[in-house]
Amino acid sequence: MELQDKIAPSVLSADFARLGEEVAEVERAGADMIHFDVMDGHFVPNLSIGIPVLESLRKVTRLPLDAHLMIENPERYVEVFVKTGANSVSVHAEVCTDIPAMAKRLHDLGARASVGINPETDVERVLPFAAHLDMILIMSVHPGFGGQEFIPEALEKLRAVRRELDRRALKVDIEIDGGVKLDNIAEVKAAGANVFVSGSGIFGQDDYRKVVKEMRDLIAHAPVKA
């Protein structure tokens, strides 16, 4: 089974005054899932949206909701996020003490299990547990704020993770999050990513349908991964 390429607009960059409309627009534009960033002001130096907003979005879109928990003590909250409507949940390796147990809990709740790593975290923090996961999330910016520039060193992390997953014949998605736009999406695809989170690269544009189509074309014609 081949891994599907998926475009995941990040609502952190959407117009919050008309969030439901924004999500409906990217759904009509051809997005595959909605990326939902949760920040607690502790694990990252910012606060963002939470459970009530996720619950509201669940009512207005059929797309999978991908909850990215940039929070301390994620084990306290994964159940409520799933029950509120998240189809997949990413916790961070830096604060998750038992990745296999977390993955099992998410699977038991009926959600996909993902673990993310920050730019300064080595891939070995998550790779030993890859068989337990549905997705590995590589941060290509320092988490906490939207609109940051892509960190080029993330490309080698993508390559390292994809090589190891291929070596072990594991069908695990690799999600890239941070600074992904038209000018680099083919490069991150070539490096091994297949789930592409983009905030201002989509919500900051005038024509969502046009930019999603262009992204999909660039992904489809990306060179064979390095």
Image: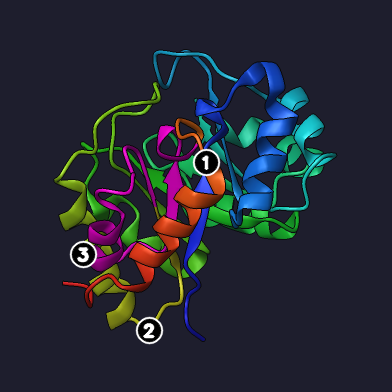
Give the Cα separation between the discs numbered 1 and 2. 38 Å
Q: Could you tell me if the residues under marks 1 and 2 are in contact, i.e. CB atoms within 8 Å?
A: no
The mark that comes first in sequence, 1 or 2, is 2
> Does residue 156 belong to the magenta stretch?
no
Where on the picture, by quarter, is residue 93?
top left
Q: Nearer the viewer, residue 191 or 86?
A: 191
Residue at image coords 27%, 57%: 188
Q: Amino acid at mark 2?
A: Ala
Q: Is residue 129 above or below residue 168?
A: above
In front: mark 3 or mark 1?
1
Decide: few, some or many residues near mark 1? Use Cα within 10 Å; few <14, some 14-19, many ≥20. few
The residue where tag 3 is placed is: 159
The structure's colour scheme is rainbow
Residue under label 1, please give it: 207
- Proximity of marks 2 and 3: CB atoms separated by less than 8 Å: no
Q: In the image, is residue 181 part of the stretch drawn in magenta?
A: yes
Q: Position of residue 115 (x, y in %)?
A: 45, 49
Counting from the top left corner in percent of width and height, residue 121 is at: 24, 41
- Residue 41 at x, y percent in the picture: 47, 13
From this view, report whether residue 39 is shown above or below residue 103. above
Range drawn in magenta: 176-202
Q: Which residue is mark 2?
A: 169
224 or 18, which is in the foreground?
18
Mark 2 element type: loop
The amino acid pointed to by label 3 is Arg
Of badges 2 and 3, nearer the viewer stands: 3
Residue at left offset 80%, top offset 38%:
84
Q: Dot 3, how many residues are within 10 Å of its Cα: few (below 14), some (14-19), or many (20+)?
A: some
